[in-house]
Amino acid sequence: MRRFATLLLAGTIAVSALATAAYAENPMVGGAAMFANKTIVDNAVNSKDHTTLVAAVKAAGLVETLQGAGPFTVFAPTNEAFAALPAGTVDTLL
């Protein structure tokens, strides 16, 4: 019985570690997984919370740049953050 409990505990720990590793590799943003093997643009397109950001990146002509080798750091405001800007600001950006 003790051996079974030890195996069960070890199995639970292993599954937990795998789930944690999978999450660390593909964190969720806007309800969509962000994949390390995809570009910033590809990941942002899959996030329902970043449609304004994607539009701004396209309007600025940065899609090709952000699909390059990088490395890049992008502070990605959500649609909610863009909506909090003063009236007309987003229209001016786009």
Image (tube, grey):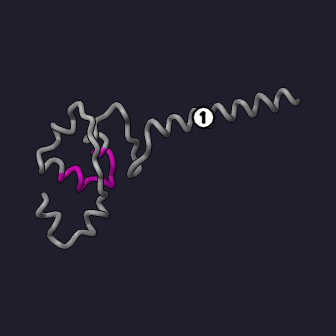
**Residue drawn at point x = 11 percent, y = 63 percent:** 92
Asked if residue 54 is among those painted magenta in the image, a careful observer would answer yes
Residue 9, given in percent of the width and then of the height, sits at 75, 34
Q: Which amino acid does label 1 sit on?
A: Ala
Specify the segment rendered in magenta: 44-56
Which residue is located at x 23 percent, y 56 percent? 52
**Could you tell me which residue is drawn at 39 percent across and 49 percent down?**
29
**63 displayed left or right of 9:** left
- Left or right relative to 40: residue 8: right
Q: Main secondary structure of the magenta part?
A: helix
Is 16 drawn above or below residue 82 in the view shown?
above
Report the residue that reaches farthest toward the bottom.
87
Residue that numbered label 1 is attached to: 17
Q: In which quarter of the image is the C terminus?
A: bottom left
Quadrant where the N terminus is found in the figure: top right
* Quarter of the rendering containing residue 90: bottom left
Is 89 inside the magenta-drawn segment? Answer: no
Q: How crowded is mark 1: few (under 14 residues within 10 Å), some or many (20 or more)?
A: few
| Percent position of residue 83, x then y | 26, 67
Instruction: Give residue 64's position: percent from left, percent from top.
Output: 15, 37
Q: Which of 70 and 4 is in front in this view?
A: 70
